[in-house]
């Protein structure tokens, strides 16, 4: 199994060749299998997926900070000798992606946010994080693993495989991850994201995060927004064909494959 050499050991997978797309899963706990259907893109690109520190196969390491998440992403790129990549973050993974882009703009040729937001500023989103913190405090990892995995995958096999991975996550780290995601804001660093093109992909029915698009449009020069019909938040898993097609078309239209 591929792990980073330095501690904490971060688990990652690499498939395909070509321009690199690194996918960041949403902490808490979901891990690299969140993007199992994005491996289909490996016919055209080098796909990197990983487990956030403390999640699934990656090593537990307390305390947890956003800066350490960012450092872990950089370590994976460095270890694979990838100088520049397209960074794609899903949900809370998009918060990490934006923090990485602000800290290391020279390592990014494009930024993709699936169900993205720059901070937890809406009522229902905040309630989701608060519920996650409460579940972590109860150490109900089996409940969380079943709920999230079966909510994301229609395939029982895929859901079971994700649930098994998620149950390896330490509940203390899970609680910290939820707290970091709920309290961290990229709002004031958005102006640093004017270098790479930005693609926002939203489920058309994921209504309570749609409003985040407006600030991105205001402060970032090159922004494109795509809505996936009949989709809620689970875009990469339940609407993978549309999601992957949008990503490929955007990369071609921006000529990012030549970077």
Image (cartoon, rainbow, N blue to C red):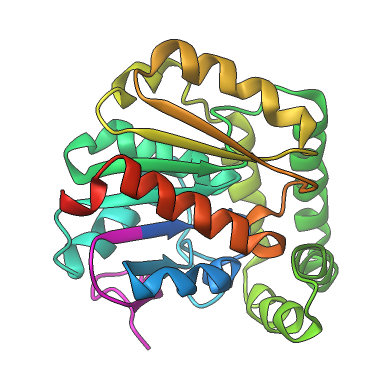
On screen, residue 79 versus residue 154, left or right, reads left
- Based on the picture, tell me whether residue 16 belongs to the magenta stretch: yes
204 relative to 170, above or below: above
Q: Closer to the camera, 86 or 228?
A: 228
Q: Where, by quadrant of the figure, is residue 73 drawn?
A: bottom left
Q: Closer to the camera, 116 or 201?
A: 201
On screen, residue 185 versus residue 174, left or right, reads left
Helix, strand or loop: magenta stretch: loop
Q: Closer to the camera, 7 or 115?
A: 115
Residue 123 appearing in the image: yes
The quadrant of the rendering that contains the N terminus is: bottom left
Estimate the x, y position of residue 177 in percent, counting from the top left. 59, 49
Give the magenta-colored segment's residue range.
1-21
Estimate the x, y position of residue 86 in percent, counting from the top left. 32, 50
- Based on the picture, tell me whether residue 244 belongs to the magenta stretch: no
Residue displayed at 75% across by 83% down? 160
Q: Where, by quadrant of the figure, is residue 48 drawn?
A: bottom left
Estimate the x, y position of residue 7 in percent, counting from the top left. 30, 69
On screen, residue 55 versus residue 10, left or right, reads right
Residue displayed at 50% across by 38% down? 95
Estimate the x, y position of residue 232 in percent, counting from the top left. 78, 46
Q: Closer to the camera, 62 or 203?
A: 203
Residue displayed at 41% across by 13% down? 219
Q: Where, by quadrant of the figure, is residue 196 drawn?
A: top left
150 relative to 215, above or below: below
133 relative to 45, above or below: above
């Amino acid at each position: 199994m591929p792990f980073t050499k330095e501690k904490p050991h971060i688990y990652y997978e690499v498939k395909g060749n070509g321009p690199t797309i690194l996918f960041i899963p949403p902490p808490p706990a979901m891990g690299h299998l969140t993007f199992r259907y994005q491996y289909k893109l490996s016919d055209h690109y080098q796909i990197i997926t990983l487990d956030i520190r403390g999640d699934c196969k990656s090593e537990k390491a307390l305390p947890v900070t956003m800066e350490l998440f960012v450092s872990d992403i950089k370590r994976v790129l460095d270890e694979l000798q990838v100088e520049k990549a397209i960074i794609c973050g899903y949900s809370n993974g998009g918060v990490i992606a934006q923090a990485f882009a602000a800290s290391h703009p020279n390592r990014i040729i494009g930024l993709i946010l699936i169900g993205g937001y720059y901070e937890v500023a809406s009522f229902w989103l905040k309630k989701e994080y608060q519920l996650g913190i409460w579940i972590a405090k109860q150490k109900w990892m089996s409940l969380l693993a079943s709920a999230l995995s079966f909510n994301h995958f229609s395939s029982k096999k895929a859901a079971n495989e994700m649930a098994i991975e998620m149950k390896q996550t330490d509940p203390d780290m899970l609680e910290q991850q939820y707290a970091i995601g709920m309290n961290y804001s990229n709002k004031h660093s958005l102006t640093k994201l004017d270098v790479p093109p930005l693609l926002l992909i939203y489920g058309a029915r994921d209504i309570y995060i749609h409003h985040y698009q407006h600030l991105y449009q205001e402060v970032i020069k090159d922004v494109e927004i795509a809505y996936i019909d009949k989709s809620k938040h689970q875009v990469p898993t339940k609407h993978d064909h549309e999601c992957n097609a949008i990503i490929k078309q955007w990369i071609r239209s921006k000529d990012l494959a030549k970077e």
